[in-house]
């Protein structure tokens, strides 16, 4: 550091003059001379150097990470303030409402799949069933030939309203079948709720939408509400199941081919036969 | 005495035999995705042997006061024998009912199914053990017009 202040320089020099002069020990000088004679050069302080192959690997890793990140961002659709309609192969269209984020997961003739992160879509599908799927955090909507509106928030809570045909909504083995004129709520922890017709009484809707009230649901059900009661069969305890079945049988007289005991045991084939019979009242 | 008993038993057997009739439902009842856009679907009951079945359907309506009718194509389900569908083949304007007639051997069944923009009106449908009469069809159209009048 260059001292530009003359007064400071004079001060420093006066301090130096006051310091005693001490010679280095003889052994220090002998050591230095010996090393100079041996041709040893002063070794600089060690510096860590990355090998070249490490740089190459880091570069490759960065490129691969960038590719994966880009791939993960590809296919996302964010509609912002406007709506957008996309074609689903040759089988239909999906209108995406403003404020919706979704991704095209698969676009093959044998499978068309979207992932709805949040927002609302309206699907119109003309294909055979089980070709079009929409995943949400609370389950998957499986098109069975239909037109419907599906909403979801980031947690997966939402609603499915079916206007034509019917839709299956599945989550971890739990399934709801929702025909035209009906709706079902979806929840992130428990998947699809119990569907009901949109013209069902408010008592019935309250009985199945929130904390399940079996007696209230049975009391409020019309013949058409056997849709709701059929789903209720599979959601109640063994002790509650018989009253549900008996109420169904009162609202929609059943043929002898429907085996009550098998239905109460939740035999899959018996439940399927019961559903097919009750569907004539939906 | 024996003849009385036999007559009673014959009558009982006759009475217990299921009557030939129609049952109508929403498209979901067909379990057939091809029918998802149908106006309604139907099946017959009490007809042993689908091969004996003969179905005809006609749409009858009033458009601007004028009575109109047209024969309808009835689609049979390939996956569920005995299930049929009627797609809308009549215009949107006016009030319309569909008259179904079924023949199963010597048994006949009829039905009148009123429709509006939301679909078939289940609670207004009428069923007969014969073909529906023109007067019954006209009465159904009149009822429908009253219900569909703007309030």
Image (spheres, coloured by chain):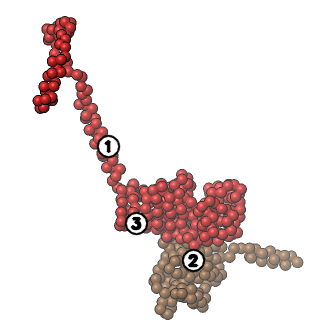
Residue, far bottom: B65
Parent chain of label 2: B
Q: Residue under mark 1: which chain is it in?
A: A
Q: Check disc 2 and report its element: helix, strand or loop.
A: strand
Q: Is residue A280 visible?
A: no
- The dot on residue A65 is 1
Nearer mark to the viewer, of 3 and 2: 3
Report the front residue among A133 and A137.
A137
Residue B54 tag number:
2
* Left-right relation of A214 to A52: right
Query: Real-space Cα distance between discs 3 and 2?
Result: 47 Å
Residue at the limit of the structure toward the right, as seen here: B1
Q: Which chain is brown?
A: B
Which residue matches tag 3? Answer: A97
User: Which residue occupies 46% across, 83% down?
Assistant: B92
Task: Tell me if residue A41 comes above or below residue B27 in the rendering.
Answer: above
């Amino acid at each position: 550091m260059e001292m530009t202040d003359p007064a400071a320089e004079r001060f420093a020099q006066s301090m130096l003059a006051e310091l005693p002069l001490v010679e280095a020990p003889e052994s220090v000088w002998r050591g230095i001379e010996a090393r100079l004679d041996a041709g040893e050069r002063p070794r600089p302080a060690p510096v860590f150097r990355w090998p070249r192959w490490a740089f190459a690997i880091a570069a490759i890793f960065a490129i691969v990470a960038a590719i994966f990140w880009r791939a993960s961002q590809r296919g996302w659709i964010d509609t912002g303030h406007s709506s957008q309609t996309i074609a689903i192969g040759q089988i239909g269209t999906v209108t995406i409402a403003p404020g919706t984020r979704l991704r095209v997961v698969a676009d093959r003739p044998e499978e068309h799949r979207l992932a709805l992160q949040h927002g609302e879509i309206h699907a119109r599908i003309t294909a055979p069933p089980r070709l079009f799927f929409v995943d949400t955090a609370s389950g998957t909507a499986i098109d069975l030939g239909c037109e419907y509106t599906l909403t979801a928030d980031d947690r997966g809570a939402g609603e499915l309203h079916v206007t034509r045909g019917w839709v299956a909504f599945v989550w971890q083995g739990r399934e709801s079948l929702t025909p035209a004129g009906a709706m079902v709520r979806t929840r992130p922890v428990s998947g699809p709720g119990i569907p009901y017709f949109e013209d069902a009484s408010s008592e019935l809707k309250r009985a199945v939408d929130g904390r399940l009230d079996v007696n209230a649901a049975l009391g409020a059900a019309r013949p058409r509400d056997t849709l709701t009661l059929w789903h209720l069969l599979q959601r109640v305890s063994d002790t509650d199941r018989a009253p549900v079945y008996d109420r169904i049988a009162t609202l929609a007289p059943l043929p002898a081919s429907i085996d009550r005991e098998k239905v109460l045991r939740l035999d899959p084939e018996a439940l399927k036969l019961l559903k097919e019979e009750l569907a004539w009242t939906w | 005495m024996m003849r009385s008993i036999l007559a009673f038993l014959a009558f009982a057997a006759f009475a217990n035999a299921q009557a030939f009739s129609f049952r109508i439902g929403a498209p979901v009842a067909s379990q057939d995705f091809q029918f998802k856009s149908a106006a309604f679907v139907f099946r017959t009951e009490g007809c042993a042997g689908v091969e004996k079945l003969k179905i005809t359907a006609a749409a009858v309506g009033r458009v601007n006061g004028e009575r109109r009718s047209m024969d309808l194509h009835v689609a049979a389900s390939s996956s569920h024998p005995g299930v049929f569908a009627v797609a809308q083949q009549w215009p949107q304007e006016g009030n319309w009912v569909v008259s179904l007639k079924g023949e199963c051997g010597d048994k006949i069944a009829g039905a009148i199914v009123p429709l509006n923009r939301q679909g078939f009106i289940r609670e207004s449908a009428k069923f007969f053990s014969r073909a529906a009469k023109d007067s019954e069809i006209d009465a159904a159209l009149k009822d429908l017009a009253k219900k569909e009048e703007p309030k």
